[in-house]
Image (cartoon, helix red, strand yellow):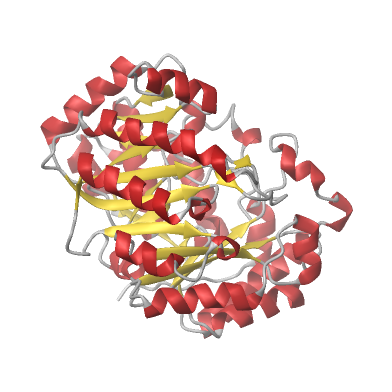
Amino acid sequence: MMDQSIQFDLDLIKRYDKSGPRYTSYPTALELHEGFGDTDYRRQIAASNAAGGPLSLYFHIPFCDTVCFYCACNKIITKNRAHSTPYLDNLVKEIALQGALFDSDRVVNQLHWGGGTPTFLNPEQMKRLMDATRQHFNLRDDDQGEYSIEVDPRETRQDTIAQLRQLGFNRISLGLQDFDPDVQKAVNRIQGKQQTFAVLDAARKEGFRSTNIDLIYGLPKQTEDTFSRTLADVLDYSPDRFSIFNYAHMPSRFKTQRQINEADMPAPAVKLEILQRVGRMLTEAGYVYIGMDHFAKPDDELAVAQRQGKLYRNFQGYSTHSDCDLVGLGITSIGRVGDAYIQNVKELDQYDDLIGQGSLPVFRGVELDADDRLRRAVITQIICHFELTYRTIEQAFAIRFSDYFAAELEQLAEMQNDGLLTLNSEGIQVSTAGRLLIRNICMVFDRYLAQKQQQFSKVI
């Protein structure tokens, strides 16, 4: 059985802790350009239909009632619930526009509502959105799809979770970040334990197959002990998965982060102490390391898919559905269809104008060339499975790996000397110490990285 453990090597982490992408796509979203538009997207959809296969749908619900200062998501802060009505009207129209372009026999195996706060919508609006989706796309009715939603426990009513289950959702992710009162005040997210765990209990009662908790380390006022208490409290409720993210403080890019007092930020050494404690506590509790901040129980679908070599990575993180083209709906959403990545416009007025004209709300995109597809396959294999067999890549892309990636293998040889990985004539094997630094290893294969590295967060 595959070893899914990690090893915390402080010297290695300090040496390799530099900025780099999270590789939810390759090329990364920074390569999307405005020269790609409606016509290009339609051409990719036609090619996708010709190839066939299932679909994945992502819906972006941008509204939040209050702002969390750490947040780097695309969001609209408002207490006026009426603002969601015209947006939902346009989103339903976009569903019809896009649904008409995809073959009706293509089953939706994966669906995700993200944000923002999807539960900002009221029950009638959520039902309307799912009904429209079912009308224009081929949703499963056997509960075997992976239909997930991000939930803010502060935005759930007594019957919210039951309604979500009735709509077809079977996976749920709860935003938490930290229970410590001082941390919550510092980031403007006040959230109680009772309301959080009530949602988790309700999800289990209603038959959700997977529960995930989001935490963030590196927030202001955090210490190793305070974060450990939060993690211990959550472990008592034993969620199926954890997403434990490194807070990336980049106030020059994200205006809301300017409201954080930088004097309250934990020192880099403290962040490393927190990360080390997290790894130990989760491992002792029986969780395995999936990669890139994600832990899961050994019998969770992500952990099983990784052991079976079937794990994938997309804009929602790790996934078990590598065979799905991803259709993005709503402002700022990003899809992957055919050989292209596509992003919708970011502003509500632009979205309204384009939808009103009956046009796809495409803002930018990028079509992958042969080198992009090759490097994407290499990076995906390494970041999902911590290993790569040269022969698999050579057969799929008709190359000789040692020739095509001669320069990259020289860089990996240095990483081998540092203990991050092992190279041999057959492939690459990432060590347990190298798994926390998997982004660094993938960065070796990224031909766009040199001029863009300053725009990414630190890997640890």
User: Residue 421, how many percent across, how many down?
Assistant: 46, 58
User: Residue 298, how many percent across, how many down?
Assistant: 37, 77
Residue at image location 29% in from the left, 27% down from the top: 370
User: Residue 137, how many percent across, how many down?
Assistant: 21, 42
Q: Nearer the viewer, residue 87 or 6?
A: 87
* Residue 204 in which image quadrant: bottom left
Q: Is residue 343 visible?
A: yes
* Residue 409 in which image quadrant: top left
Q: Nearer the viewer, residue 15 or 56?
A: 56
Residue at image location 73% in from the left, 59% down from the top: 219
Point out the image quarter for the C terminus: bottom right
User: Residue 66, how many percent across, how many down?
Assistant: 68, 50
Relative vertical location of residue 342 with respect to residue 322 in this rendering, above or below: above
Q: Left or right: 31 with respect to 109?
A: right
Point out the image quarter for the N terminus: bottom left
Q: Left or right: 55 with respect to 129?
A: left
Residue at image location 60% in from the left, 70% down from the top: 8
Q: Is residue 446 visible?
A: no
Residue at image location 44% in from the left, 39% down from the top: 445
Q: Nearer the viewer, residue 54 or 310?
A: 54
Q: Left or right: 264 with respect to 20?
A: right
Q: Left or right: 188 with respect to 151?
A: right
Q: Nearer the viewer, residue 175 or 34?
A: 175
Relative vertical location of residue 406 with respect to residue 97 in this rendering, above or below: below
